[in-house]
Amino acid sequence: MTNKFIHFIANWKMFGDINSINSLNKVIKFSNIHKKNKYRIIYCPPYTLLNLFSRKVKNTRIMLGAQNCHHEQNNSAFTGSISAKMIKKIGAKYVIVGHSEVRADGETDLIINKKIKTLINNGLNIILCVGETLSQRKKKQTYKILKNQISRALKGIKKKNNILIAYEPIWSIGTGIIPKIFDLDKDIKYLKNFLLKKIKIKKPKILYGGSVNDKNIIDLKKIDILDGFLIGGASHSPKKFIDIIKKTFI
Ligand code: PGA
């Protein structure tokens, strides 16, 4: 994995307040020193911190992402929502869509598809999350679920080079459990082939997410076709987050 360009995405979910800004100091320092390795750090804090984080990461190697956005075009009457244009204006470059926690809250494949179109129109990069439940896995429906989620999310979309696919088995998110490396390797290969041949993405990029930490990264990094990691809990600690990055390249 060491010769490739690796994404480390910090998904802070509904955590963090104005004091959390200080936790970026160590990560900025680290990224200033370790310039040689090919990696990209993307912080996705809650909306309330986007402005603060944006100012903090200006002129650093760290990029900014949002955890969601509204699917409709800009400047519409949607109380409580944030548009793609607003996210772009604040300086973010990425937006997460299709996270299982958002899907569980009512985000459908159709809404995801609309969001992706809106994000592309606004020149933003997309982190599309897909993943199966444990019962679907046990019933050997994983590939069917992933293929459906991806095909529906990307229906009618021609410009697909700005989309990262994050494979996040739902049973792995926040549980401390990761798939067996052998199985995950096989699943990522399957997904890459599907994206290449059926979805016609020339250079598909796949991330893994779900309980990534500074210990299991030693095994996860063996999957050399992975293009990075979407990290929840472990990304709140700058030390753990930096360790994950360091260990990926050792
Ligand atoms: P986790 O979350 O690393 O805490 O499992 C990952 C995610 O939901 O993106």
Image: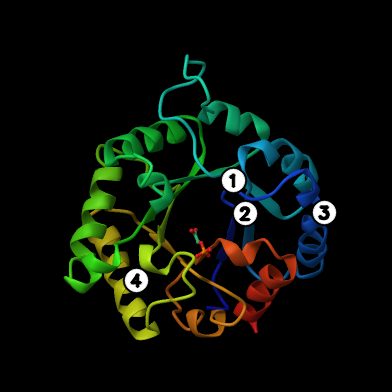
* Residue of label 4: 188
* The CB of the residue at mark 3 lies under 8 Å from ligand 1: no
Which mark sits nearer the N-terminus, 1 or 4?
1
Q: Which of the 4 image quadrants contains residue 187? A: bottom left
Q: Are marks 4 and 3 in contact (CB under 8 Å)?
A: no
Q: CA distance from mark 4 to mark 3?
A: 35 Å
The correct choice, above or below, for 145 with respect to 103 in the image is below
Q: CA distance from mark 2 to mark 1?
A: 6 Å
Residue shown at the point (69%, 76%) measured from the top left: 243
- x%, y% of residue 64? 64, 46
Which mark sits nearer the N-terminus, 2 or 1?
2
Q: CA distance from mark 1 to mark 4?
A: 24 Å
Q: Are marks 2 and 3 in contact (CB under 8 Å)?
A: no
Q: CA distance from mark 1 to mark 3?
A: 18 Å
- x%, y% of residue 219? 50, 85
* Residue of label 2: 42
Q: Are marks 1 and 4 in contact (CB under 8 Å)?
A: no
Identified by mark 3, the residue type is Asn
The correct choice, above or below, for 16 with respect to 142 in the image is above
* Front: mark 4 or 3: 3
Q: Are marks 2 and 1 in contact (CB under 8 Å)?
A: yes
Observer able to see residue 128 = no
Which mark sits nearer the N-terminus, 2 or 4?
2
Q: Is residue 14 left or right of residue 24?
A: left
Q: CA distance from mark 2 to mark 4?
A: 22 Å
* The CB of the residue at mark 4 lies under 8 Å from ligand 1: no
